[in-house]
Image (tube, rainbow, N blue to C red):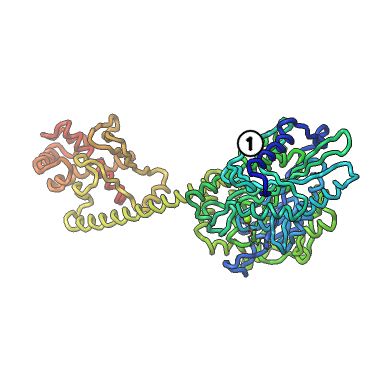
Amino acid sequence: MATGVSTLQRRREMAATTATSGAGRCRLSKIGASRRPPPARVRVAVRLRPFVDRTAGTSDPPCVRGIDSCSLEIANWRNHQETLKYQFDAFYGERSTQQDIYTGSVQPILRHLLEGQNASVLAYGPTGAGKTHTMLGSPEQPGVIPRALMDLLQLTREEGTEGRPWALSVTMSYLEIYQEKVLDLLDPASGDLVIREDCRGNILIPGLTQKPITSFADFERHFLPASRNRTVGATRLNQRSSRSHAVLLVKVDQRERLAPFRQREGKLYLIDLAGSEDNRRTGNRGLRLKESGAINTSLFVLGKVVDALNQGLPRVPYRDSKLTRLLQDSLGGSAHSILIANIAPERRFYLDTVSALNFAARSKEVINRPFTNESLQSPVLAPVKLSQKELLGPPEAKRARGPEEEEIGSPEPMAAPASASQKLSPLQKLSSMDPAMLERLLSLDRLLASQGSLGAPLLSTPKRERMVLMKTVEERDLEIERLKMKQKELEAKVLAQKAEDSKEKENHYPTMLRPLSHRTVTVAKPLKRAVVMPLQLIQAQAASPNVEIHILKNKGRKRKLESLDASEPEEKAEDCWELQISPELLAHGRKKILDLLNEGSARDLRSLQRIGPKKAQLIVGWRELHGPFSQVEDLERVEGITGKLMESFLKANILGLAACQRCDPS
Ligand code: ADP
Ligand code: MG
């Protein structure tokens, strides 16, 4: 802050200046306002930084590499026989310099500011991928911001000298958007500022500090201390990860020296966006998670805005986040905008890299060849697009390519032999590095495929949707694990029970039939136990379409049991299970009872439910007198067997035998 003037007073002055140039009178004329140029696309460049990760093995091959000055390729995690090829307006390889990026993609747009047009440069990408390096750089390798400021100040000095038609002045503002709040970094006490739009569609922030600057030293004097006010927090990914969008606004005001004394204003936004990394990998909790939510939301909206602009959609959702609202007059429309997506070559960045590329890509192509570590032979560089030519002069275009392409590249690189590709595929190594993550991704992929997804690449879906899907898969995995454990336990129990049964059968019951008292399903005892089949049996049953699987269903407070003739179910209030049994097994149960009635001794008959020694004797007597029973229901003719008893006898015995049959199909 300049000395001698109170903050409040200065802010009032600045507010007045802003109002004058904006909503108040709308006096500014914009060049071309009457003959508006067609809406400009947001240009997208990708910068791949070199390996800087000292902790992870630096000898690892990169998982992404450039193809030419506009495209790159990356391993496809979904299928390591494929490579994903992305195309952009420009691609800067890992050996490209700060100068390359600046002259290739930023410098050409500065001249538009002097024509009264707006421009914006945004650095996008996960934390640690080089956004701040690209925008700010270091004293040895200055980035876009110092270079642009130097050039702009130089330009305005030249254009604004005495004798030239326009007088020029430059001001700077520096703000951050943190958790959807607009904070003035040149006056941190000012609190959340509002974003307004004037009658001409200019976006302004009343109360935002604007500092006049005439030299680079002026700029540094304001900028450096303000940078320290930026909100940063430590995450697992980067100790000084930026948690806010840092927005440097440079305004070039022009006043005509002679009549008609027109005024015009050009705005340049230079933005170091907050990291685009995935929340789950940062270990964020609480406030950090909330921050990440806000960051992801505004980046998601930014993605939608860029897409809408580049596809020429009628509605551009600028208002959906503070960041895009602020950029409404400087992103798209007559503005010149460039988004620099920063990516890192290390494999631990792989997923964030793919997501950054999907965010930024103009086009994506799946190439049927494994991504290997082999260098590409004899370069055939794709011609620079016309749009790119507009921006780049021939020397810049060459520089922008990055030197690696001079030694690599073949028109169609040979697919590596399977063994070599497997050995060298970074995807293989990715899986060995983080199998849990890869497994989750693959199962998610399978899940999508099983749900009829038409092969839409998972990673091109919006990040939030992906996160929800990943969570679902994780939950399902856990559930499946839990069920498997339960299945195993029950299988073991059933096998133990069977072993016990067969032992007893050998000892006491040499006949084919087993005593019903051992059956698990009775009427007297409520059906609380489900009979669980061994896995092989389930599979065998599933394979045979004719055999139904029996289900015990919880029915709340009532229990329904199918009556033997399947006509009307009986209800008992005390129980809560329903047994559904296939007709085949019911018939089988009936037949066994009939056999037992006709052939069993009085002792055998006592093994039936509801049949005591007296009734067993009566049945044997009736059989001797009248011959064999022709159907189970004939039992009712035996003395002492009433209709009610008959009903419960049938239910108990037939269901029991049927259930037993499920355990022992022999
Ligand atoms: P971000 O702002 O995206 O979190 P940084 O710009 O802080 O990432 O970069 C992380 C580290 O990588 C820093 O140490 C930075 O100096 C280094 N770095 C980034 N890009 C490059 C590059 N192109 N060349 C050399 N070092 C780089
Ligand atoms: Mg940074």
How would you rate the neighbour count of disc 1 (Cα within 10 Å): few for under 14, some for 14-19, many for 20 or more? some
- Residue nearer the viewer, 283 or 4: 4
Residue 362: tell me if it is visible. no
- Residue 566's place in the image compared with 294, above or below, is above
- Residue 320's place in the image compared with 497, above or below, is above
- Residue 505's place in the image compared with 544, above or below, is below
Ligand 2 in which quarter: bottom right
Q: Where is residue 505 in the image (x, y as percent from the top left)?
A: 20, 55
Residue 136: tell me if it is visible. yes
Q: Which residue is at 58% across, 43% downward?
A: 297
Q: In the structure shown, which secondary structural element does the residue marked by tag 1 occupy?
A: helix
- Residue nearer the viewer, 227 or 437: 227
Q: Which residue is at 64% across, 37% downward?
A: 195
> Quick check: is the Cβ at mark 1 less than 8 Å away from ligand 2?
no
Relative placement, left or right, of 495 versus 450 is left
- Residue nearer the viewer, 555 or 186: 186
Q: Position of residue 1 (x, y in %)?
A: 66, 49
Residue indicated by mark 1: 319
Q: In which quarter of the image is residue 502?
A: bottom left
Q: Where is residue 305 in the image (x, y as percent from the top left)?
A: 67, 40
